Image (tube, rainbow, N blue to C red):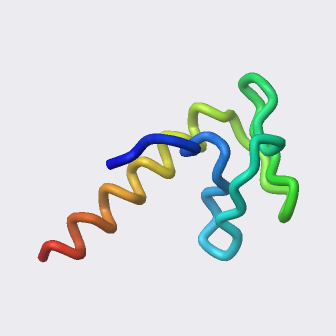
Amino acid sequence: MDPRNTSRTCPRTECGHVAAENRDQEVFECTRCGHGDHADRVGALNIATRAGLALRAVA
């Protein structure tokens, strides 16, 4: 699983916007929908979601 851009991708299902501007140090704020969170938490959420989707596809 490729971890690139996990902390720059909006974790909201209806958004998913990827941009370098979404992250400023530890702060994540989506430039499209305005969702805000800690960048590390956003990265972890995106990794967990991708892992879950990968497992679902195999099953």
Q: Is residue 36 above or below residue 40?
A: below
Q: Where residue 3 sits: x, y (%)?
A: 44, 41
| Residue 25 quadrant | top right
Count up the numbered dots: 0
Question: Which percent across, then down, holds residue 40?
Answer: 58, 31
Image-quadrant location for residue 14 = bottom right
Q: Quadrant of residue 15?
A: bottom right
Q: Quadrant of the C terminus?
A: bottom left
Residue drawn at x 31%, y 62% as measured from the top left: 52
- Identify the residue at horizontal 83%, vertical 42% (top origin): 21
Residue at the spot 84% in from the left edge and 64% down from the top edge: 33
Examine the rendered structure and indicate whether residue 13 appears above or below residue 18: below
20 left or right of 54?
right
Q: Residue furthest left?
A: 59
Above or below: residue 57 compared with residue 44? below
The location of residue 9, given as percent across then percent down, is: 64, 52
The reply, left or right, for residue 46 in relation to residue 25 is left
